[in-house]
Image (cartoon, helix red, strand yellow):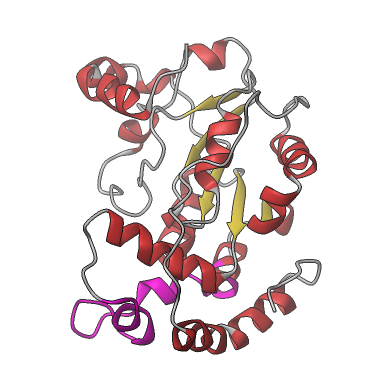
Amino acid sequence: MARSKRIRKHLHRTFYPYYRATAALRPLPNSVIIGGMKCGTTTLNAWLRSHPEVAFSAIKEIHFFDQNYEKDPGWYRSFFPIWETLLGAKCVLEATPAYLFRASVVAERMHRLVPEARLIVMLRDPVKRAISHYGHRVRNGEEDRSIEEALLSDYGRAVGSDNSYKTRGLYADQIQTFRKFYAEHQIMVIKSEDFFAKSEPIYAAVLNFLGVSQRPLPEGSSPRNVGQRQAEIPVEVTEHLSQYYQAPNQRLAELLPSFSVWP
């Protein structure tokens, strides 16, 4: 029976001593969805959970390689299942979309522990991604600035900090950092717009990349964690972001010649 994220998290917290005591028996992931935020990873995560050959971490977004690295690999292993592995799961998967953004810290750490892992990257038009990210934080009560204040500035809320709404969309630099440690064939890059427009063939390609059998999309498949429609976005914001990403998108096109970047 499928369990909600809240229940899975509660079970892991409640029975942590057991999970930790059996950590040595638990697998490390052989596949990781590393990003990006607001790019469709929640939907892909939900669809893959229905596949019988995919063993998922107890919760999405463990944040081991960025926020919890001071904890040992046993703590990390405690999130992964024994039973599904014994039943023949071929893919052990976790998804923490912030890993891509934090590539400079995460990539080497990840390679040190799971060097053979397959990595999935989902990329959305960075202009729309930044706007969606802003709306997400407003709805969660984490942002009280106007959209102009938040997205036209080069700085974040903290003095001297980068504007992460914008820098999360500098995909080429982030992917290049992971490529220093992982071979090209270990990294699958998906254009989010294609993922939602042509879900069946993209999903089939994902299953092939993960080395699991082909299955149709789960019944009743629909996008997950979709933000509410934004109020009309000021033209100056979209024009500013389009200009901001022009050169980074060109670098992405050069890095990934077969990837169709956004106009």
| Residue 31, position as x, y percentages in the image | 58, 39
| Residue 61, position as x, y percentages in the image | 39, 43
From the viewer's side, name the closer residue of 171 and 151. Answer: 151
| Residue 236, position as x, y percentages in the image | 46, 89
82, above or below 150, in the image: above
Judged left or right of residue 139, residue 256 is right
216, above or below 235, in the image: above
Q: How many marks?
A: 0
Q: Is residue 149 magenta?
A: yes
- Quarter of the image where one finds residue 167: bottom left
From the viewer's side, name the closer residue of 88 and 157. Answer: 157
Judged left or right of residue 181, residue 189 is right
From the viewer's side, name the closer residue of 90 and 114. Answer: 90
> Which residue is painted at 75% across and 24% down in the image?
215
Residue 88 can be seen in this image? yes
- Quarter of the image where one finds residue 10: top left
> Which residue is painted at 34% across and 83% down in the image?
148
In the image as oriented, which residue stretches furthest toward the front? 232
Residue 186 can be seen in this image? no
| Residue 204, position as x, y percentages in the image | 77, 37
- Quarter of the image where one finds residue 163: bottom left
> Which residue is painted at 51% across and 55% down in the image?
35
Start and end of the magenta stretch?
146-174
Q: Is residue 231 magenta?
A: no
From the viewer's side, name the closer residue of 48 and 68. Answer: 48
> Which residue is painted at 62% across and 32% down in the image?
221
Judged left or right of residue 67, residue 259 is right
Quadrant containing the C terminus in the rendered view? bottom right
